[in-house]
Image (cartoon, rainbow, N blue to C red):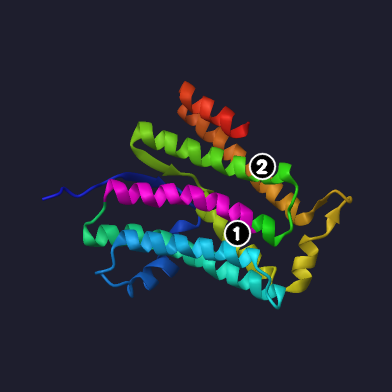
Amino acid sequence: MIPEYHYRIEDDSLVLPFFKRRIVSPLFSVVPRSLPANMITIFSNILMYMALVAALIEFPVRSLRFIVIAVLVFGYLIGDHFDGMQAKRTGTSSALGEFCDHFLDVFNNGILVFIVCLSFEITNPALVAIFLTAGYLTHAIIFHEQFHSKCLRFGKFGSLESAMILSTLMLICAIEPVYRFFMQKLFGVYTLAELFFIVSSIGAIATFMHYVIRTGVRDFLFWLFCVLLIS
């Protein structure tokens, strides 16, 4: 008999308790017990790719595109919690399931960046690179700490909060005056949307530095990875 797989998580998320109690848990009751957790992982990730396609294609009405993207991203967030809950409920937790779940989350970070850039017409290559790098540095330090401590730790403001803010922003930008507000250029340089995501990236870098200071990471290969990523 294969022993049950366990891994530790310490999650100080500000949003997660409310999100799981009020949204995820009630919806989880309708998930069939026979549905494999890894299938839930795959399906929820497909929703992110569908959101990317929605950002790429033209809709008859722009507001409809923002609504579709917001719903798909929110569906991904729900599915991202369903798979772990299903694995625990059915006793099918595995290293493969954990790897797929978190490994695909890293890809979804990049997909979300491209969705944002497409939706708000952010074409400056430097800004796109900054948005991607900031997100991936944060993911890198989180998983590096997990590798050494055998515990996955999330701070008060992490990927869940970021994705929920972005999906909410997409939803309110379905209102045309709100969209036009975010597309205004401040001092003729950056739009308010670009400034919003620049500030978000600074927050991600701050999170990265917090982890670095707390863990005191001195791993040469990790820092080499960071240098190559930035390069």
Q: Residue at x 66, y 42 (%)?
A: 129
The prevailing secondary structure element of the residues shown in magenta is helix
Element on which disc 1 rests: helix
**Could you tell me residue 25's position as x and y percent?**
37, 68
| Name of the residue lying farthest toward the bottom | 60
> Which residue position is annotated with label 1?
165
Residue at 54% across / 50% down in the picture?
109
Q: Where is residue 152 in the image (x, y as percent from the top left)?
A: 39, 42
- Residue sitting nearer the eye, 56 or 5: 56
Is 176 situated above or below 216? Answer: below
Q: Tell me which numbered mark, 1 or 2, is placed earlier along the sequence.
A: 2
Residue 65, image quadrant: bottom right
Q: Which amino acid does label 1 sit on?
A: Ile
Magenta-drawn stretch contains 105: yes
Residue at the image position 76 percent from the left and 73 percent from the top:
176
Spatial CA span between label 1 and label 2: 21 Å
Residue 129, label in figure: 2
Residue at the extreme left of the image, as rendered: 1
Q: Is residue 139 left or right of residue 117?
A: left
Q: Tell me the tag on residue 115.
A: none
Q: Which residue is drawn at 42% across and 47% down?
A: 103
Q: Which circle, 1 or 2, is nearer the viewer?
A: 2
What's the magenta region? 94-115
> Could you tell me residue 99's position as x and y percent?
36, 46
Give the residue type at disc 2.
Answer: Ala
